[in-house]
Image (spheres, rainbow, N blue to C red):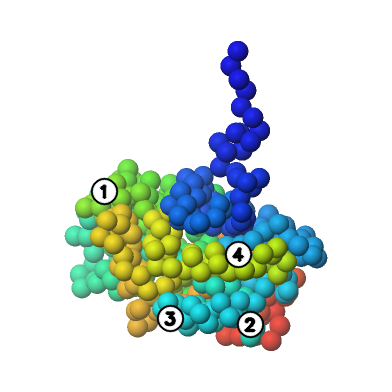
């Protein structure tokens, strides 16, 4: 008779080693099964102690930490999350890491990122861990149709519109694409790119005259966008099958196109609007629960993850770029080499407008994103009146920000209390 696997064997097959691991790494990052396994096998495997890497949805991550905050000794050793997620936690949940941060300053970490890790206070609450962003990608077949005089590394939204029109005229089909499906990140395009580029704001100017002009422009762009964009989750797929020739998405959601056919595609920065070139860096951090059972072990693991070697391993596993000074090896996948140039060009542009991921919203984060998606659906897909739609949604936006008590984040100017929606 065939012997049935033991419970321990089943746990091992599922990638869970919590019963045997020395340390538990609770993270909202690298959640997809393949990425999580690469984190375990590439980024964490060389570490001297065994680590149970536990990727979690944001809601579960926040809820568990809030539920365990009063426990004298918690079960979690290390936390990994986005800036906005870690900033949503109740004060006191995260242990201060000032001494550790001071020992890492020679690693080349951006002072701006270290300041973000203080979460608006005086003490270091997380150590910047890795970064990514959203960029544009194009099939090389689209390049001859760029409008005359356009610089691919310094496009405007007017030029993107003209490019889309040229492509549709030449091919008979709309060839622009955006990730507007149920699992797509169209809300990040609105929050981090369009709004900052036209209003230098995300919240304060939500229904301003500049916002109205922005929505009018995006309507025009959408008219030359492949209508199947409402079904796209990851833009690498329509780029590879040729439905789309020019697309916007997260670097991690473009990597298959770049890796499978690197000679067919180019990566470049997002366009600029009247207020500048809005872009959204995705900054993830490492934090330690205040009730961690062995703080020294947690800090030691952070120090390992901040070494150039571990940062390169994390890059291989997740396509998130290092935050420390690290020489990228020649054998990196094409997606990393291609994205890296576009990321650097975008963030260093003279007209760059940094837009952080929504911060301080806690359980309201999903509703915040939904308001921007709802605006897109009503204004762009259903052709609703722009001003009326924004007037309906603005009070809802203000209510959830008030409920969360979230103050303004970049690019909006600081606020005393909840960020105001004008």
CA distance for labels 2 and 4: 20 Å
User: Which residue corresponds to the image point at 42% horizontal and 77% vertical from the top-left?
Assistant: 107
Q: Judging from the image, what secondary structure is the residue with disc 1 in? A: loop
User: Which residue corresponds to the image point at 53% horizontal and 61% vertical from the top-left?
Assistant: 187
Camera-nearest residue between 79 and 407: 79
Residue 384 in the image: x percent, y percent? Answer: 56, 61
CA distance for labels 1 and 3: 38 Å
CA distance for labels 1 and 4: 43 Å
Between tags 1 and 2, which lies in front?
A: 2
Q: Earlier in the sequence, mark 3 or mark 2?
A: 3
The correct choice, above or below, for 416 with respect to 89 in the image is below
Quadrant including the N terminus: top right
- Mark 2 highlights which residue? 123
Q: Judging from the image, what secondary structure is the residue with disc 3 in? A: helix
Q: Earlier in the sequence, mark 1 or mark 2?
A: 2
Camera-nearest residue between 92 and 173: 92
């Amino acid at each position: 008779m065939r012997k049935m696997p033991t419970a321990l064997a089943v746990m091992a097959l599922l990638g869970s080693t919590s019963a045997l691991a020395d340390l538990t790494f609770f993270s909202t990052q690298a959640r997809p099964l393949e990425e999580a396994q690469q984190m375990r096998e590439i980024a964490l495997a060389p570490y001297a102690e065994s680590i149970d890497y536990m990727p979690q949805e944001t809601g579960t991550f926040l809820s568990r930490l809030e539920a365990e905050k009063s426990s004298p000794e918690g079960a979690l050793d290390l936390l990994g999350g986005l800036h906005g997620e870690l900033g949503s936690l109740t004060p006191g949940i995260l242990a201060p890491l000032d001494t550790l941060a001071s020992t890492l300053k020679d690693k080349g970490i951006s002072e701006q990122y270290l300041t973000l890790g203080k979460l608006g206070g005086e003490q270091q609450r997380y150590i910047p861990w890795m970064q990514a962003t959203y960029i544009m990608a194009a099939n090389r077949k689209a390049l001859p149709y760029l409008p005359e005089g356009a610089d691919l590394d310094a496009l405007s939204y007017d030029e993107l519109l003209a490019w889309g029109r040229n492509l549709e005229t030449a091919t008979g089909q709309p060839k622009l694409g955006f990730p507007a499906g149920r699992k797509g990140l169209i809300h990040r395009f609105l929050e981090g790119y369009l709004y900052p580029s036209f209003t230098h704001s995300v919240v304060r100017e939500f229904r301003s005259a500049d916002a109205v002009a922005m929505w009018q422009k995006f309507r025009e762009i959408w008219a030359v966008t492949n209508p199947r964009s409402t079904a796209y989750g990851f833009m690498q797929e329509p780029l590879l099958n040729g439905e789309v020739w020019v697309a916007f998405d997260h670097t991690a959601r473009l990597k298959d196109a770049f890796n499978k056919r690197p000679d067919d595609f180019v990566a470049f920065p997002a366009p600029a609007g009247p207020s500048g070139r809005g872009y959204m860096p995705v900054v993830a951090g490492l934090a330690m629960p205040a009730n961690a059972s062995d703080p020294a072990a947690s800090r030691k693991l952070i120090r390992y993850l901040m070494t150039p070697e571990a940062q390169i391993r994390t890059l291989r596993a997740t396509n998130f770029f290092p935050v420390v000074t690290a020489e990228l090896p020649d054998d990196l996948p094409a997606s990393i080499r291609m994205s890296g140039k576009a990321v650097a060009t975008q963030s260093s542009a003279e007209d760059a407008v940094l837009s952080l991921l929504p911060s301080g919203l806690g359980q309201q984060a999903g509703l915040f994103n939904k308001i921007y998606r709802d605006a897109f659906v009503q204004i762009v897909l259903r052709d609703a009146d722009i001003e009326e739609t924004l007037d309906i949604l603005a009070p809802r936006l203000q209510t959830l920000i008030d409920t969360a008590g979230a103050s303004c984040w970049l690019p909006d100017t600081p606020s005393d209390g909840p960020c105001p929606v004008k």
